[in-house]
Image (cartoon, rainbow, N blue to C red):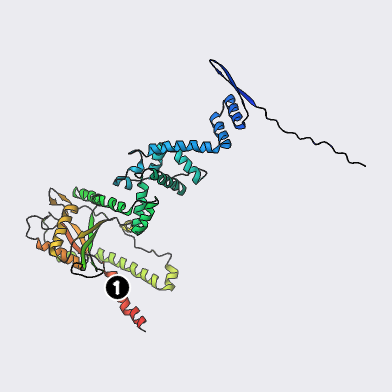
Amino acid sequence: MTNQCLPVLNFQQVTLPMQVSVYYASGKKSVEITNDAHKTICKAFIRGKGVEKIIVDSICKANKSAVIHGAGQILKEESQRTCKRGNSLLQRKDYHNFFGFHWKDMYDDLSRTCPSLLELLSSVVCDIPPAPPSKPFVHIMLAAAVALHGRNQEMSLMHYFTGFILTHGGCTQRDIERLSKIGFSVHPQTVHKKLISWQDNLDMDLVSIRDSWAEGDQTKFQIIGDNWDKNILPSYRTSDRKTLSLHLFNMYAIVDRVVPASSTNSLTENRPELDNLKFIPSTQEQELLLKEMTFLCARSVIENIPQIGNLFHKIYPDHLEHKYSRFAGLKTTQYPLGLYDCNETKTADVVQLLKKLTNMYVPMKDDEIVEPVFFGGDRLTDERVQGAQQAMSNAGSAKERLEGFISKTEDFHRLMNFLEVQFLLWLKAIFSH
């Protein structure tokens, strides 16, 4: 039996060319189109639906480099327009722009000037456009800021923020300089100059509280401070290079959390001498004191005796409720006032410091003191402030007599002294054995 070879038929789809004719006033011009992408575009023109989308999709499949080149031209024009002077939020770097910054404002600004750039970066970061202020959204904003900063060095708002964060976190000047060279931050000297330019704005909110206080508002503040001394030893000592002694004074303004009830002005009211019997606790005050002491003793027993603590720890309150309980958990509002060139061991320096602080922070009306401000410090500072006030006691006005401050002592060194005693009594004895 012989094998017969059967013929094999190969079927191939024959793509016929498409003929397109364009009619002019002078005549007709026809051309045959063989490219599949071009045929799809011609069919889209005939159907008349979704023409632009079909054209873009066809070109993206057939010639991606042409699409990328076209998108690059669009991004180039947007970037040039965005980086023009005064045309972008990233170029505004004054005090209010930094402290009033919101990611939404930056997004709206970039959406107005360079929407294609945001669309491109959003496609790179995630598939779905992120909502502010999510982490992918912040990534898009930072990427746009870095890219635009490469075109124009004035587009540096976010780079200032990076420099501020690194400086506040204790990053070395050399590391910040290295980051500035690769375009992630501004130079550390630029950060320093910007912070110096804001020196007059540091106490802006505090001055506003002072003015409101002078007009009768009950929100008040007090000032605390302590000396800051440091000796800088030279690497080698000569007649010109001696030990440099710095004597500065560091201060903070603390806003009172509890607003006291309004009362008559104690400075202008002439009150008679109070009887000593007024200071003896009344029956109601003794009952209140007994209630508070009972609570404190019970709380101490529960905390220190495990058997009782296991029974009552979860049901007995941790704190005694009073009318100011809601203020106890609030964070204290404080304003750093900086370092002042003042040696508190010299009365003349303390007098000059108090005169300057009187003009800056004491509430005054018609050049008269409305109410004095508490000035807290350790016992040495308290003594120096009172000594400066006594030295100016013969001046002609209350302002010149430095009566705008009431000196008081603070427990700055209590914890340090307590730990020092514990070390001397217990740890030192244990280590010696």
Quadrant the C terminus occupies: bottom left
Name the residue at 56% across, 34% down: 59
Q: Quadrant of residue 288?
A: bottom left
Judge by depth and name the residue closer to the eye, 224 or 82: 82
Residue 80 lies left or right of residue 293; in this view the side is right
Judge by depth and name the residue closer to the eye, 203 or 339: 339
Could you tell me residue 300's position as x and y percent?
36, 70
Could you tell me residue 213's position as x and y percent?
21, 50
Residue matched to label 1: 418
Could you tell me residue 27's position as x and y percent?
56, 16
Could you tell me residue 123's position as x and y percent?
50, 43
Amino acid type assigned to the residue bearing label 1 in the image:
Phe
Quadrant the N terminus occupies: top right
Picture layout, residue 148 above or below residue 383: above
Judge by depth and name the residue closer to the eye, 156 or 287: 156
Crowding at label 1, few (<14), some or many (≥20) Cα neighbours within 10 Å?
few
Residue 129 appears in the rendering: no
Picture layout, residue 367 above or below residue 59: below
Residue 163 appears in the rendering: yes
